Image (cartoon, rainbow, N blue to C red):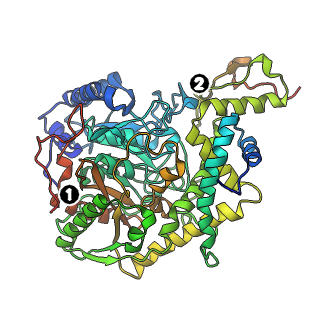
């Protein structure tokens, strides 16, 4: 059981992640994620004073392409997988979401 | 280039079709028939593309002479369900992508099609490639062809089972922490994770963007090299891909390992925490001895930070996953939940739709990783977890760089996994135990280095054991060269699991460790 992860923290993180959890899930994840974080504590023992901070593979190469216009995904294809597509004026098609502004 | 062409390998099938000895339609039908006969038991496939495959095979037969130099002419392949195939279901084995049909092919798919490959279906995997057992799949687990009560590994368990069960000689899959190599080891096939930047990820559903790489699972080393030759190279749609020196299949194998120095990280292997199974250890030592007999020099490799690869990986990978999976919100694709009138309205309504969609659409392991990653990136914890893990990651890469440059090591050898395939259900409720099994595979993703898993024998119970080699950046050729030596000494790939049960078929004669 972890001392560093609480049920309240799990619920706060779930809200940040836009993830609804059942009470059972929140309980289970508090325990399981606590175990993983406890295990990850061993990283604190590593001397990283001489380590590069943001290293990632391929960082040396960052080729830039020419900045020019190119065809993109046709709008009909782009919305073809939408769970709730909508048709607008002049044949335009949209992604529809629940109302955001009153 | 290595073993003589065999009519079950990709190179053998290609030669037979190009030479007019077999038709692509006949080969394709055989593949589809095997899937129809065995997949109800194994559950390796998420969708079978029967009509499309037969139509493509017929086209290849019609244009055989014109296309006879295509490197995968008429070769049946399967594609992991996290890789986009235009107009065909691509679900990442997740409920949240039920019904999704991509508007484009992944670059690897485009290249495979252009090389003459025939896609016969998509393969099962852990949801969004997160897992080591294919038990976290919305389609249910894939069974190991060698032992139906055991996992085929993960996340590419379907891909490995499909090659082992001879559905098709090639599977294309993704490897973020061992997802190609670990299932390859569990199912007794070859699995390659190329160097980061070698293969375009365009059209791969992103999991860990600094870790993800696409590679083949095959029966032989020669087939892996042939497929890499097709899928490698720069792509304007993936800025991390480049035109590195090619890993030319032709120049790699030479039948011996003289002049090569193989490094073994003894301290990592001996650590009790690695949990190395005695039978895996003895298969590893036997394979090492075979490579030594072929002329390689075996030395100790000093990789002091490799022991921290699992904790570093399980902070970095979930952090990247939590960001990448933010796109699954029920707006642009996939399933949506929580928009009934009873939910109220206003801004809270949209947030609620996101939360409910993600609750209903994601499985438990994906939720755990999103939570872990969100936590590691959140204010107050970023430095202690994510930043620290990235620093340790750079130290692990420094270890390898020193081993290659200072100690003159050409490839590092370890077992692929500490144990053979574990029983289904064994680790499903214990995420940490599942993660610890990745101790030998995650380093290659953290460092971006190329790595390959090779079949290296079987346990007394008949379970395959994998032998892993990790090489210098863009030096897949060294992996193929050593892999070829091992394959000649012990051609385990010629054994195949018996249909309908565990155990091996005697038909092909056994490979013994030499």
At 53% across and 52% down in the image, what residue appears? B432
Can you give x and y, in whole percent of width and height, for residue B478 in the image? 30, 66
At 59% across and 28% down in the image, what residue appears? B334
**Is any part of residue B212 visible from this angle?**
no
Of all chains, the one bearing label 2 is A
Residue beneath label 2, please?
A80
Helix, strand or loop for disc 2: loop
Q: Horizontal placement of B246 versus B30: left or right?
A: right
**Is any part of residue B100 visible from this angle?**
yes
At 72% across and 18% down in the image, what residue appears? A90
Residue projecting furthest to the right: A102
Can you give x and y, in whole percent of width and height, for residue A102 in the image? 89, 25
The part of the image, by quadrant, that contains residue A101 is top right
At 23% across and 26% down in the image, what residue appears? B29
Can you give x and y, in whole percent of width and height, for residue B161 in the image? 32, 39
The part of the image, by quadrant, that contains residue B513 is bottom left
Q: Which mark is residue B368?
A: none
Can you give x and y, in whole percent of width and height, for residue B414 in the image? 35, 65
Q: Is residue B316 above or below residue B66?
A: below
Q: Nearer the viewer, residue A34 or B313?
A: A34
Q: Nearer the viewer, residue B209 or A48?
A: A48
Mark 2, other Cα within 10 Å: few <14 / some 14–19 / many ≥20: some
Q: Nearer the viewer, residue B377 or B205?
A: B377
Helix, strand or loop for disc 1: helix
Q: CA distance from mark 2 to mark 1?
A: 47 Å
Mark 1, other Cα within 10 Å: few <14 / some 14–19 / many ≥20: many
Of all chains, the one bearing label 1 is B
Q: Nearer the viewer, residue B306 or B448?
A: B306
Residue beneath label 1, please?
B487
Q: Which numbered disc, 2 or 1, marks the residue closer to the eye?
A: 1
């Amino acid at each position: 059981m972890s001392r560093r992860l609480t049920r309240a923290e799990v619920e706060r993180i779930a809200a940040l992640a836009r993830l609804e959890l059942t009470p059972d899930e929140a309980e289970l994840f508090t325990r399981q994620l606590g175990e993983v974080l406890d295990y990850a504590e061993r990283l604190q023992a590593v001397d990283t004073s001489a380590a590069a901070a943001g290293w990632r593979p391929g960082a040396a190469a960052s080729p830039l392409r020419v900045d020019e216009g190119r065809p993109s995904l046709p709008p009909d294809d782009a919305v073809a997988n939408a769970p709730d597509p909508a048709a607008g004026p002049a044949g335009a098609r949209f992604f529809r979401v629940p109302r955001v502004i009153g | 280039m290595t073993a003589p062409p065999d009519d079950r390998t990709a190179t053998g099938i290609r030669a037979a079709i190009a030479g007019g000895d077999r038709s692509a339609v006949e080969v394709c039908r055989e593949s589809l028939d095997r899937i129809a006969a065995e997949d109800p038991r194994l559950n390796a496939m998420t969708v079978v593309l029967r009509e499309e495959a037969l139509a493509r095979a017929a086209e290849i037969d019609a244009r055989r002479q014109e296309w006879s130099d295509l490197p995968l002419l008429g070769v049946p392949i399967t594609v992991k369900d996290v890789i986009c195939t235009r107009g065909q279901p691509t679900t990442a084995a997740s409920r949240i992508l039920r019904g999704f049909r991509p508007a484009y092919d992944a670059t690897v798919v485009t290249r495979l099609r252009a090389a003459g490959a025939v896609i016969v279906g998509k393969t099962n995997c852990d949801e969004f490639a997160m897992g080591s057992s294919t038990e976290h799949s919305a389609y249910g687990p894939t069974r190991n062809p060698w032992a139906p009560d055991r996992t085929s590994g993960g996340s590419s368990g379907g891909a490995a089972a499909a090659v082992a069960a001879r559905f098709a000689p090639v599977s294309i899959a993704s490897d973020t922490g061992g997802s190609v190599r670990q299932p390859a080891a569990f199912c007794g096939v070859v699995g390659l994770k190329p160097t980061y930047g070698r293969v375009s990820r365009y059209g791969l559903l992103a999991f860990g963007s600094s870790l993800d790489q696409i590679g083949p699972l095959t029966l032989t080393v020669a087939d892996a090299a042939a497929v890499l030759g097709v899928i490698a190279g720069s792509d304007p749609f993936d800025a991390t891909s480049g035109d590195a020196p090619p890993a030319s299949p032709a120049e790699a194998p030479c039948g011996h390992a003289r002049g090569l120095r193989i490094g073994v990280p003894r301290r990592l292997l001996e650590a009790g925490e690695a949990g190395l199974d005695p039978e895996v250890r003895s298969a590893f030592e036997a394979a090492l001895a075979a490579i030594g007999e072929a002329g390689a020099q075996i030395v100790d490799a000093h990789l002091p930070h490799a022991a921290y690869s699992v904790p570093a990986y399980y902070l970095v990978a979930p952090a990247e996953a939590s960001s990448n999976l933010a796109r699954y919100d029920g707006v642009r694709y996939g399933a949506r939940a929580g928009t009934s009138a009873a939910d109220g309205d206003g801004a809270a309504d949209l947030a609620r739709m996101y939360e409910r969609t993600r609750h209903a659409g994601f499985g438990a392991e994906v939720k755990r990783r999103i939570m872990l990653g969100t936590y590691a990136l959140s204010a107050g914890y970023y430095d202690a977890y994510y930043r620290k893990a990235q620093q340790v990651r750079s130290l692990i890469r420094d270890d390898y760089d020193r081993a290659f440059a200072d100690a003159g090591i050409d490839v590092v050898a370890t077992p692929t996994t500490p144990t053979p395939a574990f029983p289904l259900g064994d680790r499903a409720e214990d995420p940490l135990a599942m993660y610890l099994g990745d101790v030998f595979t995650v380093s290659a993703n953290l460092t971006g280095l190329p790595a390959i898993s090779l079949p290296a024998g079987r346990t007394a119970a008949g379970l395959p054991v994998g032998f892993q080699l990790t090489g210098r950046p863009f030096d897949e050729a060294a992996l193929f060269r050593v892999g070829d030596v091992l394959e000649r000494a012990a051609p385990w790939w010629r054994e195949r699991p018996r249909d309908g049960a565990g155990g091996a078929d005697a038909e092909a004669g056994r490979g013994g460790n030499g």
